[in-house]
Image (cartoon, rainbow, N blue to C red):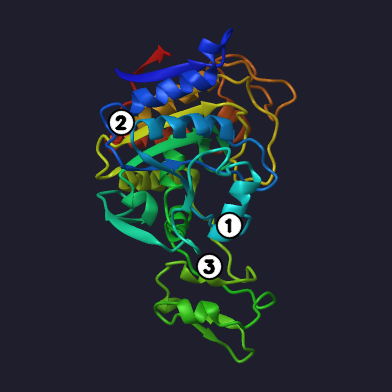
């Protein structure tokens, strides 16, 4: 059975400090796998403006210090969002990270937005998936020597569970890859009332599928469109919007196939830390943070992405539900908190499919640290 290390939040003296034990846990995960001067991508979510549920910078500092002591060169990273918000481009994204406390004095590592200024710095990786033969991975993550993923585990309106698989599969994809996961096909439908005739979508369309109509507004030649979503990157007025047409099951399978692409070739140069704190019903991409569904549980660490998500989900289900949260009936230990708040999202699909693709094993044993 795969070991998953468990760090509880109980501490009665400085030697039992959560931060000290998190430093030691990170060292354990890195031991024998990191070389001097390895570029270590610390993949996390900086949180959308208005959200406060993201991983605290003080935790990230302990992880970064362990990487530096092991000889690695850490950088904090995430990718730009498909939706328009405060992390839609690298400039706004960096400002949001700093606004949320991920500044250099607090966390001694630089920040690199992995897919560049507009979300189109990507590398294509070949995979053998049911839905994809190639996936578009953010370049800085693809080029990093080591990937250490820090995940705030929570619910998700489409995937049901937002764990390490989502953080890697969706979170490491360039923007076009995110669009491919959310919809089988993407055909931009420019909204005339928002189009200002700037021509940016037309100039950047690789197949000349977009053109000006007689009203000087962008319009699509559907037969030429390849669904690359480049136009989405450049429209300054949201006249072109993302497509969100995938079912929950399809989204989860595509997300897992992207995780397969991200981890391909990394071998033993990966590790995962899942933070079961402030477990909200929705993703940190929301510009708000709802009340936690359960009490804080602790931090998990593993080299197996499937095992750590399975263990995280099990601990959340075993925990008592909190009154005053979004939960309707799943208050008893053992009840399914995720299905209660998102009944249409059968979240176990992602874990089962990941095991089928060989990303890891669901069978695990917890080892307390």
**Side (left or right) of 92 relative to 262:** right
Q: Residues within 10 Å of mark 2 (few under 14, many from 20)?
A: some
Residue 176 placement, left or right of 267: right
- How far apart marks 1 and 2 lie (CA) works out to 30 Å
| Residue underneath mark 1 | 83
Residue at 55% from the left image edge and 61% from the top image edge: 242
Q: Which residue is mark 3?
A: 232
Q: CA distance from mark 2 to mark 3?
A: 34 Å
Q: Residues within 10 Å of mark 1 (few under 14, many from 20)?
A: some
Give the quadrant of the C terminus: top left
**Residue 41: assigned label:** none
* Snapshot quadrant of residue 205: bottom left
Q: Is residue 325 left or right of residue 168?
A: right
Compute the Cα span from label 3 to label 1. Answer: 9 Å
State the SS at label 2: loop
The kind of secondary structure element at disc 3 is helix
**Quick check: 247 above or below 4?**
below
Residue 298 visible: no
């Amino acid at each position: 059975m795969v070991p998953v290390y468990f760090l509880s939040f109980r501490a009665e003296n400085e030697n039992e400090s959560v931060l000290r034990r998190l430093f030691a846990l990170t060292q354990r995960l890195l031991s024998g796998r990191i070389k001097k001067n390895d570029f270590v991508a610390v993949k996390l979510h900086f949180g959308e403006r208005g959200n406060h549920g993201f991983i605290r910078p003080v935790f990230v500092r302990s992880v970064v210090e362990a990487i530096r002591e092991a000889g690695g060169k850490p950088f904090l990273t995430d990718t730009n969002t498909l939706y328009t918000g405060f992390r839609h481009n690298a400039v706004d994204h960096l400002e949001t990270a700093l606004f949320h406390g991920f500044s250099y004095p607090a966390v001694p590592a630089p920040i690199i937005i992995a897919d560049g200024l507009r979300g189109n710095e990507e590398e294509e990786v070949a995979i053998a998936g049911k839905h994809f033969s190639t996936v578009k991975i953010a370049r800085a993550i693809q080029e990093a020597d080591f990937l250490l993923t820090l995940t705030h585990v929570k619910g998700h309106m489409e995937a049901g569970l937002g764990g390490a698989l989502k953080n890697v599969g969706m979170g490491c994809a360039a923007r076009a890859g995110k669009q491919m996961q959310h919809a089988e096909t993407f055909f931009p439908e420019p909204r005339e009332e928002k189009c200002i005739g700037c021509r940016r979508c037309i100039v950047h369309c690789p197949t000349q599928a977009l053109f000006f109509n007689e009203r000087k507004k962008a319009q699509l030649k559907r037969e030429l469109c390849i669904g690359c979503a480049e136009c989405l990157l450049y429209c300054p007025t949201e006249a072109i919007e993302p497509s969100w047409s995938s079912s929950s099951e399809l989204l989860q399978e595509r997300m897992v196939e992207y995780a397969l692409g991200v981890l391909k070739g990394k071998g033993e140069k990966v590790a995962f830390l899942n933070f079961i704190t402030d477990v909200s019903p929705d993703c940190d991409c929301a510009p708000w943070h709802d009340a936690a569904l359960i009490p804080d549980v602790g931090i998990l660490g593993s080299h197996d992405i499937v095992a750590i998500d399975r263990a995280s989900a099990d601990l959340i289900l075993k925990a008592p539900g909190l009154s005053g949260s979004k939960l309707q009936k799943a208050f008893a230990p053992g009840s399914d908190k995720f299905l209660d708040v998102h009944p249409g999202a059968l979240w176990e699909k992602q874990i089962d499919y990941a095991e089928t693709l060989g990303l890891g094993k669901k069978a695990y044993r917890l080892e307390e640290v």
